Image (cartoon, rainbow, N blue to C red):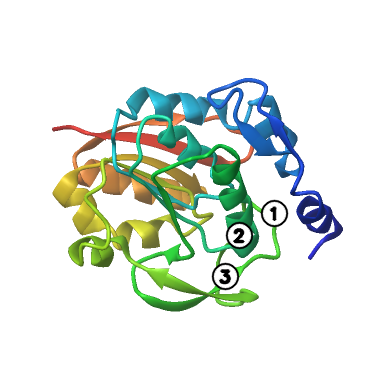
Amino acid sequence: MSIKHFFKQLFSGISAKIQDGPLKGKKWILTSGSKFIKGTFENYKAQAFLQHFKQDYVFFDIGAHFGYFSLMANSRSKNIFSFEPRPANRRFFERHMALNKAEGVQLFPYAIGDKSGTVRFNTQTGSATGHVSSDGNLEVEMISIDEWVKLNKLPKPDFIKIDVEGGELEVIKGCTDTIMGYKPKLLIATHGEDLHQSVLNFLVKSEYQYEVLEPESERGDTEIMAIPKR
């Protein structure tokens, strides 16, 4: 664990109210990052999310991180299903839900992909950039959304957010039947030009209209808001 992560965990009991943005007034762990506390975390993405997220939607938060989008969704729905394989992130997530007395949020400790089984996960990165990797330092369980929906372990989704640091195609492969069958709205982070184009090709083939949010992002990552045409 890096010194930064050590102190982040050490002082994780200290919280403050978010100063602005969609979660203004909500309580948040102070050491999670200044953008969260200031209310400036991914504002363009949050605005698109709230524009399209309706009351009582069933929401799948794939790559839930500290729970920012899950908590936003919880302001309109108690049907939140969140997935986060990284233990340190889950501790922050659970603390944020408890601080804000969130109800109707279920957190699962799984990576999401195109199969079920054990995979390696790399946590030797920033809290938001952990990812499935063959040489990862942590062993985690992976599930596919399609399998769980078919087994009725999950309800049909109205909205799916995917932010998995390069594993987006595997997630999509593992929930293609769910996407094609129920046509949920999609908010997908893509990491790299090839992955971005592959996701766009899938959306066109699947009869979605889409908007690329902040296409000139300096990070090189892009966010896609996709709505079914029908």
Mark 3 residue element: strand
Dot 2, how many residues are within 10 Å of its Cα: few (below 14), some (14-19), or many (20+)?
many
Tell me the number on the disc at residue 59: none
Task: Kindly check if marks 3 and 2 are in contact, taking CB atoms under 8 A apart as contact.
Answer: yes
Q: Residue furthest front?
A: 101
**Against 91, is 226 above or below?**
above
Q: How many marks?
A: 3
Give the Cα distance between marks 3 and 2: 7 Å
Residue placed at 21% from the left, 50% from the top? 156
Residue 130, quarter of picture: bottom right
Residue type at tag 3: Phe
Q: Residue furthest top?
A: 20
Does residue 103 appear in this view?
A: yes
Q: Position of residue 186 (x, y in %)?
A: 33, 40
Does residue 214 appear in this view?
A: no
Mark 1 = which residue?
126
**Against 77, is 162 above or below?**
below
Mark 2 = which residue?
130
Q: Position of residue 62 (x, y in %)?
A: 43, 52
Mark 3 = which residue?
121
